[in-house]
Image (tube, rainbow, N blue to C red):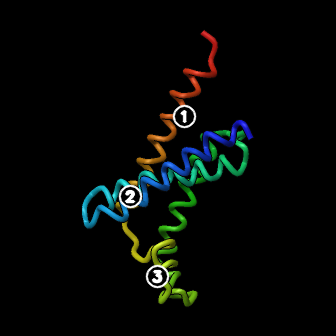
Amino acid sequence: MKKRLPYLVLLILLIAIEVIIALTQHNNWLRSYGGDVIVVWAVYCLVQSLAGGQNNHYAVHLAVLAFAFFVEFLQYMHVVDLIGLGNIQFFRTLIGTSFAVEDLLSYTIGTAIACFGSLVYYKKFYTKN
C-alpha cells in the first residue's frame, strides 16, 4: 500500500485537473491538447496504483501510450456508434467520437514528459551518489 498511495493521490489530483479543464475551458488549446497530455499521466497513475507501483515504469508508460493510441483508433472507427452506445453521452465522452492525429501527438508528448519525469525522479531518489 505504501507504494500505491502516491499514485492514488496523484491520480485523484489529475482527475480533478481534468474535470476543471472540462468544465471551464471550451474550444481552446488547453482543452483540446492539454487534457490529452494529462490523461496519459492519469492512466499511468491508475495502472501503478492498481499494480502497486512495482512495475517497470517505462514499460507502463509505453503500454499506456499504446492504449491511448488504441482508443483513438476506436474513435476513428466510430466504435461508440457501432456498438450501439452513440446515444449515451457518458460513453460518447468516455470513449470519444472523433479521431485526430493531433491527439496522437498530444499522447506522445504526455508520455515523453512522464518518462522524463520518471527518469529525473528515480535518478534523484534511487541512485547512490
CA distance separating discs 1 and 3: 35 Å
Please name which of the two marks, 3 or 2, marks the residue nearer to the observer.
2
Q: Which residue does the image show at 49% across and 41% down from the upper left?
A: 114
**SS class of the residue under badge 2?**
helix
> Most extreme residue toward the top, as rendered?
129
Q: Position of residue 74 (x, y in %)?
A: 52, 74
- Residue topped by disc 1: 118
* Residue at 67% across, 48% down: 49
Residue 23, how many percent across, how many down?
35, 65
Q: CA–CA distance between discs 1 and 2?
A: 25 Å
26, 128: nearer the viewer: 26
Closer mark to the observer between disc 1 and disc 3: 3
- Residue 128 drawn at (x, y percent): 64, 13
Left or right: 13 in relation to 57 = left
| Labels 1 & 2 near each other (Cβ < 8 A) | no
Q: Earlier in the sequence, mark 1 or mark 3?
A: 3
Q: Which residue is mark 3?
A: 89
- Above or below — where is 77 with respect to 63? below
- Does 88 sit above or below residue 105? below
Instruction: Give the numbered dot on residue 20.
Output: 2
Estimate the x, y position of residue 96 in percent, counting from the top left.
45, 73
Classify mark 3: residues with Cα within 10 Å, few (<14), some (14-19) or many (20+).
few
Q: Amino acid at mark 3?
A: Gln
Residue type at the position of mark 2? Ile
Q: Left or right of 44: which side holds 28?
A: left
| Front disc: 1 or 2 | 2
| Residue at mark 3 to residue at mark 2: CA–CA distance | 19 Å
Q: Secondary structure at mark 1?
A: helix
